[in-house]
Image (cartoon, rainbow, N blue to C red):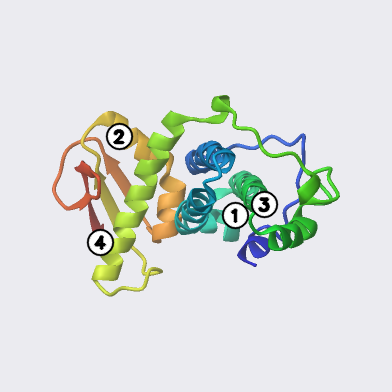
Amino acid sequence: SFANKLLEDYAPSETAEFALQPLDKWVLSKAEKLTQKVTEAMENCQFNIAVEEIRNFAWHTLCDCYVEAVKDRLYRPETQGEAKKAAAQHTLYEVLYRVLQLLSPITPHLTEEIYQAMYADYKGCKSLQLSPWPEFEQALVDEEAERRGDLIIAVIAEVRREKAEKRLPLNTRVKKLTVYAGDRETAEMIREGEGDITGTCKVVSLEVLAEKGSGREIAQYPEVHFVAEY
């Protein structure tokens, strides 16, 4: 599976500390909110809602957004460093485990197979079905991390959308990407995601300006625009 490939050289550790990046914190917070939503749905016997919440998170938030955004960290640690690769692997490992936990009552055989292959030796339970149900922890929800991550994801998505509209392959290099953030705080938020933006969008040079400017508007962020030079 894609997860096995991305995690093939990852060794889980209970004591290691990780330099989590903005998108790592973003997806971990969203996974915690998912736990709350699925738990409430299960308790109310709303199994269709639970399944829909898990599906939307797994396909959109985790695969379409997070995994796509950190692939460069995972595949090319020489560009961003081993610490950022390790942070992405740790995050992916833990978030996938949470998805398996939430999905286990619905698809017990498939989730158990994945658990035995990836987690049984590290999580302290012989079977996923014997492990405790994850408890929602409000303290692990980070609204600020989500706000910052949402913006970084939006920038990545808009650059990729422009490439698609121009019928350019997604791996087409962007010689220079100039982002007009509109204010200093927004500019700083975008700069925090520089590595994932440049890696995912194949940007050679990224310039983030605090001023307002013209160019292509970022969806849901009308004050933020960019100009891409191919």
Mark 1 vs mark 4: which is more N-terminal? 1
Q: Amino acid at mark 3?
A: Pro
Image coordinates of residue 22 in percent, x first then y, are 48, 39
Which-is-in-front pick, marks 2 and 3? 3
Amino acid of disc 1: Pro
- Distance Cα–Cα, label 3 vs label 4: 49 Å
Q: From the viewer's side, name the closer residue of 95 and 72.
A: 95
Tag 2 near tag 1, CB within 8 Å: no
Q: Secondary structure at mark 4?
A: strand
Q: Report the number of discs.
A: 4
* Residue that mark 3 sits on: 105
Taking the image as shown, residue 154 lies to the left or right of residue 70, namely left
Counting residues from the start of the chain, the first of labels 2 and 3 encountered is 3
Front-lying residue, 30 or 71: 30
Task: Please give the label number shown on residue 186.
Answer: 2
Q: Secondary structure at mark 2?
A: helix
Q: Which residue is mark 4?
A: 229
Q: Quadrant of the N terminus?
A: bottom right
SS assignment at label 3: loop
Q: Identity of the amino acid at label 4?
A: Glu
- Distance from the alpha carbon under mark 2 to that under mark 3: 41 Å
Q: Secondary structure at mark 1?
A: helix
Q: Residues within 10 Å of mark 2 (few under 14, many from 20)?
A: some
